[in-house]
Image (cartoon, rainbow, N blue to C red):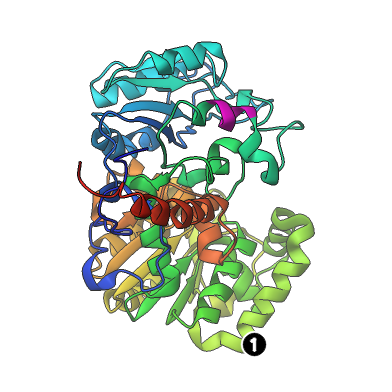
Amino acid sequence: MKGIVGTLRVCSTPTMAIEGPLVPRNVTTVLSLDDVRLAGRTVLYRVDVNSPLDPSNGAFLDDSRLRSILDTLRDLSDSKVVIMGHQSRPGKIDFTDMAGHCDRLSRLIGQQIRFVGDICGDQAMTAIEEMQPGDKVFLDNVRMHPEEYGDKKVKAEDESSSEVVTRLSSVADAYVTDAFGAAHRNSPTLTGFTEEIPCIAGRLMNKEIRSLELAVNDPPRPYVAILGGAKCDDSLRVSLNLIGRGVVDSIVMVGVVGNLMLWANGHDIGKTNKEAIKAMMGDDFEHTWMMAERLVKEHSELLFLPRDVAVEIDEKRYQLELQELPTEHPIYDIGIETLQDMRSLLNSAKCILWNGPASYFEKPEFAFGTIEILNMCAEATGVTIVGGGHTSALVNQRGMAGEFSHNSTGGGSALGMLSGDPMPVIDSLSKSNDKFRPLLEALGLDEEE
């Protein structure tokens, strides 16, 4: 490990508009690529490139997660890079080896990456030991290893002694991770190297940590959170976390969660829409309803709820004022009055968080609300953070990622951070920093050779 660590500057990578005085005060302490010298070193690089594939031929429908790791790979151009990733999980139709990912990534970066159909066996170990500086290999789907996923997955406390960690750490100098999409999970390749070798946040992971911690710890004010989509329980947990931290000024509720909040606020949205919400949430409905009632009773001054809605009648869009409710037709979008009022709110915001569509946007007649919010956020002058999932995919599909301060690659992991949930991968990075930073400094390994 000699010479790995340089002058330590924690989380110092600029993130588009998120830099300078806007960096959150309570940022997690991790090692970044700016803190280390990895040229010539063997680096285990864990990524989350789990991508949507065409079920008929396995072709990529979206390769944005592969594109998101290119910056880190360029920074590691003089290292021996061992890429570890996963695609789906056993039993799913899109559970495949990583040969296709390796081929696509090779073309994206303009360098041939060797695919190794092994994870930590003799074939993988030999391939790693034969590498020269600048070489890259892509190991097979780590979820094919029984310790990583499924009934035989090792317990968190046993990860460091697992075969995967024991064998791979024996031939590596450092571990770098950009697997933010899986940052809310534990497994040997995600959190098992904490105590074995220095664990470092890649460019993508560093941006995700800084951007989402800004959104929950110290956002510029006024701060507006737009929460939508169909995952009502997640949106309400995010709301309560932001309110509990005292960092948010307005919470805009749209999509299915907007319909739920209208109902909780005393508007009869009609039997059809009530039953649809209950069916979506299943056993989680009662708990979610309690959170909705609490928000209405205790924090109504922070809530921005739809002023009007759009329903589907005979496959056509019809606008309804709230006083025209209840309706037996499905509510699929917010209305024009809601968007007009929202525009002034977003124009004055210095920070905007957006997670979840405002409408059933897959239906062209009802994409209007979501697309208008997309455009308003892109035009906003403040910091703009997209919280992953369907919202992030929409931003990418429309080629607008560059118009936002940060577009998260995580769905469940982004919501986990925004909700204040434990984040095992980020905790692992922090613990590894605590262990290796003072050790390397004491040994003088942070100095230039």
What is the x, y in percent for residue 252?
47, 73
- Is residue 164 covered in magenta? yes
Please give the residue where the numbered disc 1 appears in the rendered image: 297
Q: Amino acid at mark 1?
A: Lys
In this rendering, would 190 be left or right of 148? left
Q: Main secondary structure of the magenta part?
A: helix
Q: Is residue 130 left or right of residue 108?
A: right
User: Is label 1 in a helix, a strand or a loop?
Assistant: helix
Q: Residue furthest front?
A: 443
Identify the residue at horizontal 44%, vertical 54% (top origin). 433
Rendered position, 4 above or below 381: above
Q: Is residue 390 visible?
A: yes
Is residue 160 or residue 15 the one in the foreground?
160
Residue 82's x, y, as percent?
A: 41, 26
Examine the rendering and report whether any part of residue 407 can be seen: no
The percent position of residue 238, horizontal first and vertical second, equals: 55, 68
Q: Residue at x 36, y 61 (%)?
A: 211
Q: Which residues are magenta?
A: 163-167
Quadrant the N terminus occupies: top left
Circle 1 residues within 10 Å: few <14, some 14–19, many ≥20? few
Question: Is the C terminus in the top left, top right, bottom left or bottom right quadrant?
Answer: top left
Q: Nearer the viewer, residue 387 or 2?
A: 2
Question: In this picture, is 144 found above or below 38?
Answer: above
Residue at screen point 49% across, 54% down: 426
Quadrant position of residue 215? bottom left
Q: Is residue 67 left or right of residue 296?
A: left
Examine the structure image and report whether residue 188 is included in the region drawn in magenta. no
**Quadrant of the rendered image containing residue 30:** bottom left
